[in-house]
Amino acid sequence: MSKSPNQVLLARAAQLASDFLDGLPERSVGVQADQASLAEALGGGLPEEGRDPLAVLERLVAAVDPGIVASAGPRYFGHVVSGAHPAALAADWLTAAWDQNAVLYATSPANAVIEEVVGRWLADLFGLSGPGRKISVGFVSGCQMAHVTALLAARHHVLMKAGWDVERQGLFGAPRIQVFCGADAHGSVTTALQYIGLGRDHSVIIPGDDQGRMRTDLLAQAIEQGHGPAIICAQAGGVNTGAFDAFSEIADVAQRHGAWLHVDGAFGLWAAVAPDHRYLTAGIARADSWATDGHKWLNVPHDSGIVLTAHPAAHRAAMSVPGEPYLHKTGETYRDPYQWVPEMSRRARAIAIYAALLSFGRDGISALVARCCRLAQRMRDHLVAADGVTILNEVVLNQVLVRIAVPDNEIGDQITDSVIAAIQAEGTCWLGGTTWRGRRALRISICNYRTTEADIDRSAAAILKQIERIVRNR
Ligand SMILES: *Cc1c(COP(=O)(O)O)cnc(C)c1O
């Protein structure tokens, strides 16, 4: 039997994808192309005439290849990046093929049910469920939008208690909301506050300790001095040190003052799944909302953020869409996904998360988290043994902060930056730089399911070689 056009096209796409994935472990992790050559290969005028999908595919792959970063590979330690797990990747392909609109139950009953199931599984995995407690969930593009959604729910909740209906009346003339944020909070929290009209500079910034944990004593003092509606933004897993705020104490403060407690757990929330790391998240279930990612530690392809709240009514009210009778149905009471996110038509994102959760199981996720943390310690142990290398953080999770220390701090900054550039250019592994407590540092983040001990040993050797070379040549 001859093959259908779909079979030919998709088989070719599958082959190209598996060739890429099979080559990933040995593909150089550095950026291979410059912007001008990419623009030349991909640009030019929009063709007048269209072409055959297979020809489009071949041309696309040839042109993009040098501009594809092997960030899904096992030795990419930049940002907080993982690699698409096979089950999640395959489910994501099917999600595109099914092309469901996740807006309503009616447009994709399967997606709506999967969203409910995944929400329940995640609340359970993170230890957020409890008797009589309903956790609401929404599937967004990333943790940034999870913050926006959660903080809109928070805004609704604290203003409603103050007698103000913010969805109808807006913020003009509203009671002033006080926001308390740790000094080492991720920038996406600040951006979310900016988006939702609470202002970037309006928050009370609570200093952190040496690991970047919010000083709870200073939070208690600051909130004591204020009055009115309050929101506290805490952090599970700082992007530099991996540190966790003291949730039990912070939850006490929040409770005393009737404040909404939001947690940024982009990757750190997953520590709750692993028995040896769960202690870091103690008290986290007492928060009011949580933001996390599928595309970091769960190794789901990108475009996968998750918002969870312990206040379904506030969550839903904050996302409410007025009017539009054509969206509203009669009789059914099941979830309509658009009521939990700031989007209408969108991909059925929860399907890939569902596949990843099924594929790993609770034990698999727990083992993945534990392994990445062990690998981070292995990296630390390799590096700390070398002359002039200082590890700046307590490696409690999957983050390692490294500095090349010399007596003169300025020179130390320059050397550290040269080392980062040299490692990136050499291509065995990729890591980025950061500034921690005013000084430059190498930042290593490990959350890819592919990374092995051999990858760590090989990367550490490459890092040490560049350090040795640069320090010697000064
Ligand atoms: C990555 C990250 C974010 C932002 O998440 P996106 O998925 O990129 O939107 C927020 N907080 C922390 C701690 C992160 O690591």
Image (cartoon, rainbow, N blue to C red):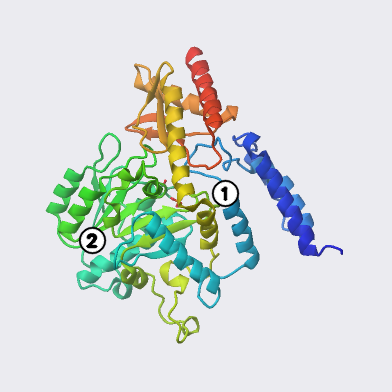
Q: Quadrant of residue 131?
A: bottom left
Query: Who comes first in sequence, dot 2 or dot 1?
Result: 1
Determine which residue is flagged by label 1: 84
The 10 Å Cα crowd at callout 1, few under 14, some 14 to 19, many 20 or more, is: many
Residue at 45% from the left image edge and 67% from the top image edge: 116
Q: Position of residue 254 (x, y in %)?
A: 20, 56
Instruction: Kindly identify the residue that appears in the image at 42 percent across and 27 percent down.
Output: 380
Q: Is residue 184 above or below residue 465?
A: below
Decide which of 257, 439 is in the foreground and name it: 257
Tell me which corner region of the image, top left, top right, bottom left or bottom right, holds residue 65: top right
Q: Amino acid at mark 2?
A: Ile
**Extreme-left residue of the structure:** 225
Depth check: give the residue in front, 203 or 146: 146
Residue 50 visible, this orientation: no
Q: Image check: 391 left or right of 87?
A: left
| Mark 1, secondary structure of its residue | loop
For label 2, being within 8 Å of ligand 1 is answered no
> Disc 2 on helix, strand or loop?
loop
The dot on residue 177 is: 2
Coordinates of residue 294 in the picture (x, y in percent): 48, 53
> Is 205 placed left or right of 264 in the picture?
left
Left/right of residue 316 with respect to residue 472 in the rendered view: left
Neighbor class of circle 2 (other Cα within 10 Å; few <14, some 14-19, many 20+) is many
Viewer-nearest residue: 44 or 321: 321
Provide residue 87's location: percent of width, then percent of height: 59, 53
> What amino acid type is highlighted by mark number 1?
Ala
